[in-house]
Image (cartoon, rainbow, N blue to C red):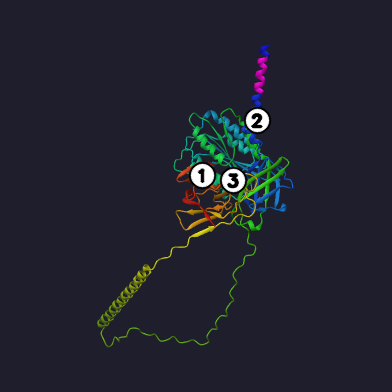
Amino acid sequence: MNKYIADGKRKVLVIFLAVFYITVSPLTAYAADVKVLQTKVYDEEIYIYIKGISELASDSTIQIGNTVCKPDQISVSSFEHMDDFMRTIILIDNSKSVPEKNHADIQALVKGIVSNAKENEQIKIGTFSKEATYLCDYTNDHVILENIIDNITYKDQDTYLSDVLYNIISELNSENTFACTRIIIVSDGADDNYIGYTNDEVQRYIDENFYPVYTVGIPKKSNASQLETMFSFSRAAKSGYFLMDGNIAGEDIVNALCTDQIGGCVKITPDEALKDGSNRSILLKLNTAEGAFELKTSADMPFGKIDDIHSEPELESQPEPETMSTVQSEPESVNVLPTISPASVNQDTEIESFGFLWIIILLAGIVVILIAVLIILLITKRKKSDASSEPVPEPEPVIIDIPTRIGPRFASGTEPEKELWGKQSLLLKNLDIPSIFFKVPTMEIITIGRRSTQDIMIDDPEVSREHCKIIIRGGLMYLQNCSKSNGTYYENVLIHEDDEVPIVNGGKIKIGQYQYSVELVDN
């Protein structure tokens, strides 16, 4: 009896663990996720690929900046009804640092991705060492792809993972296509290049672009830190990453990747007024058959086409001058130097007199030039001395007054932030370039970054798009860092991501390349 009870308890435990695994498994959670897969701009239209949705209800709203899109500006297509909606790049680390025991598993994994691909999904397979070597172009021919997989060989070579990924994204940016493009990397994480792109640079580049980057790691005895670095690239892309350690089957990884094939593409035709090339935030409040979702993304607005190109008016053709009927005789030549008749003097005397005359003229010219230069120098020196005696007015400081935003501002929640209308403004003064200030009305939260949607936009390549926030609460100021890669410093101390520290009036913060003082000033 006790034996049966014990067996029953074990069965209950097994069932419980199985349910727990299914419930909390990242693969399962990932499969049910509704998210923006990629945002692309093509032919003056914005394509937003969203996994996990089908159709939009009529009461769904999409907002670009402060502009709400009209229904006739929005269209939705499910992935399955789009031609070549997705392109998948599979890169395999074929260096000998990848253990031989894993070769068959890698082969089975890649074949699984290929065999589960949709008809309108194009796949390109390659290997990489110091650079990526593609073994085929984009194709949906499974016979070609599987033949390539079967013939991949592993070589004794270095691998430059960071450089390869950075360069792939650069190449994709130069392509002109609306298709959603994702990258899948299978590697042990080894990176032998020590003078190429840093991990921070690659993470920042991934964050600034919108390509899903999935990584499948091959574990070894001593590559935990390398795998963690590789997985950080996927986290920067807000994509999944997997460890092929036997605990997760290759089939589960394939199924997780297949979730990208279910969804819809929202195509937006923005207003002409928005087509200025600026980066704008996009808020999507979607009501779908799967439920209600609020998603955020951003896109660089297209540039509008110039329909009417005004060329400069052509000059009226002038009548050609009438040809003179009579030919004018050439004017008689005027001799500057006196003509000496060879009959009056012999030839030697003529040459000697001519040369002597030229010497005199040359010396006289040099003397005149020297006198002119001397006079100019004396006049210039006198002007400089007079000017130096007068005080030079200091240049007027450039104060950039940033007006208060009109319309809703969305931060971490869905409710608009409340603006505090007081008698003070926040003054952000560049200490390295004292002539530059930023002045904004005091609000509960003042955002700072490189995006045009920020309250204070700083055009600095070392400033993140959403770099930091200044929070005014209870009469006190707090500084919060929002940048993963560039960092924010207060009094030369690095503030960790999402940390919030109190700052004093006149305190110094470092954003990007420059230091700034923060002050609350009376209007």
The numbered mark, 1 or 3, whose residue comes first in the sequence reads 3
Give the structural element (helix, strand or loop) at label 2. Answer: helix
Q: Is residue 300 magenta?
A: no
Nearest to the eye among marks 2 and 1: give it.
1
Task: Please provide the residue range marked out in magenta.
Answer: 5-15
- Amino acid type of the residue tagged 1 in the rendering: Pro
Give the structural element (helix, strand or loop) at label 3. Answer: loop
- Amino acid type of the residue tagged 2 in the rendering: Thr
Q: Residue furthest right?
A: 58
Q: Where, by quadrant of the figure, is residue 134 drawn?
A: top right
Q: Is residue 7 magenta?
A: yes
Instruction: Name the residue nearer the viewer: 440 or 239.
Output: 440
Q: Quadrant of the C terminus?
A: bottom right
Would you say the residues marked 1 and 3 are in contact, meaning their CB atoms lie under 8 Å apart?
no
Horizontal side, residue 240 vs residue 293: left or right: left
- What residue does disc 2 label? 23
Q: CA distance from mark 1 to mark 3?
A: 34 Å
Q: Is residue 48 above or below residue 17?
A: below
- What residue does disc 1 label? 502
Instruction: Name the residue at 28% across, 79% down.
Output: 360
Q: Residues within 10 Å of mark 3 (few under 14, many from 20)?
A: many
Instruction: Name the residue nearer the viewer: 386 or 232.
Output: 386
Q: Which secondary structure is most common in the magenta stretch?
A: helix
- What residue does disc 3 label? 210
